[in-house]
Image: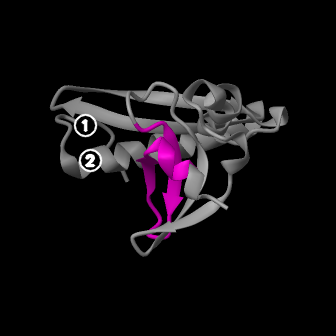
C-alpha cells in the first residue's frame, strides 16, 4: 500500500504508484466503456510524468496498437493479414498484436512466449502465418 504522503519518489514506491493508478484506470474504464494502458513512467524524486493510452471498447479494437495497425499498416508496407498471427524466431514464439505508428524503425508490436511485449522489425510480419 502507498503511504498517505509520499515525500520522495523512488524505485520502491513508483511501482506501488503505478499499481494504484492502473487499478483506478480500470475502474474508470469499466464506467466509460474504455480500456486504458499506462505507458512508461519517468520520474525524479519530486515528480513524475507518463503516457496514457485509451481505446473505446465498442469500436471493435482492444488496444491502441491494434487500432494503429488497422489504420496505418499500409503506410509501412505491412501485410494487413499478419495481425494476430504467430511465428517463431530464435526459439521464441511471437504473436503480432498491433503497430506503433510513431516508432522510427520497428513498427510492429508483438507479444512473446516469455510474456513480454516487443517492437519487432517490420520484415518479421512476413514470417507470421
Q: Which image quadrant for residue 84?
A: bottom right
Q: Is residue 91 left or right of residue 80?
A: left
Q: What is the distance, in whole Å, between disc 1 and disc 2 at their CAs?
A: 8 Å
Residue 115 point in image, percent of width and height: 47, 65
Q: Looking at the picture, does residue 40 appear above or below residue 116?
A: above
Secondary structure state at the residue bearing disc 2 = helix
Whether residues under marks 1 and 2 lie with C-beta atoms below 8 angstroms apart, the answer is yes
The magenta stretch is: 106-125
Q: Is residue 38 left or right of residue 75?
A: left
Q: Nearer the viewer, residue 75 or 119?
A: 75
Q: Image point 33% across, 49% down: which residue?
A: 15
Regarding residue 83, the answer to whether it shows in the image is no
User: Disc 2 marks which residue?
Assistant: 13
User: Disc 1 marks which residue?
Assistant: 6
Q: Any magenta on residue 38?
A: no
Q: Is residue 124 left or right of residue 42?
A: right
**Of the two numbered discs 1 and 2 in the rendering, the one whose residue sits closer to the viewer:** 2
Q: Residue furthest bottom?
A: 91
Q: Image point 35% across, 49% down: which residue?
A: 16
Disc 2 packing (10 Å; few <14; some 14–19; many ≥20): some
Disc 1 packing (10 Å; few <14; some 14–19; many ≥20): few
Q: Nearer the viewer, residue 34 or 31?
A: 34
Q: Any magenta on residue 123?
A: yes
Secondary structure state at the residue bearing disc 1 = loop
Nearer the N terminus, badge 1 or badge 2? 1
Residue 36: which numbered mark, if any? none
Q: Nearer the viewer, residue 120 or 13?
A: 120
Quadrant where the C terminus sits is bottom right
Residue 111 point in image, percent of width and height: 52, 57
Residue 18 point in image, percent of width and height: 40, 44
Q: Is residue 10 left or right of residue 14?
A: left
Residue 25 point in image, percent of width and height: 58, 38
Amino acid at each position: 500500500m502507498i503511504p498517505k504522503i509520499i515525500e520522495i519518489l523512488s524505485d520502491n514506491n513508483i511501482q506501488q504508484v503505478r499499481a494504484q493508478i492502473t487499478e483506478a484506470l480500470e475502474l474508470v474504464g469499466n464506467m466509460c466503456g474504455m480500456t486504458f494502458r499506462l505507458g512508461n513512467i519517468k520520474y525524479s524524486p519530486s515528480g513524475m510524468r507518463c503516457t496514457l493510452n485509451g481505446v473505446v471498447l465498442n469500436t471493435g479494437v482492444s488496444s491502441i496498437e491494434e487500432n494503429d495497425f488497422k489504420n496505418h499498416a499500409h503506410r509501412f508496407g505491412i501485410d494487413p493479414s499478419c495481425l494476430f498471427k504467430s511465428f517463431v524466431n530464435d526459439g521464441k514464439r511471437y504473436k503480432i498484436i498491433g503497430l506503433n505508428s510513431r516508432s522510427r524503425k520497428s513498427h510492429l508490436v508483438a507479444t512473446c512466449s516469455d510474456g513480454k511485449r516487443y517492437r519487432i522489425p517490420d520484415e518479421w510480419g512476413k514470417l507470421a502465418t
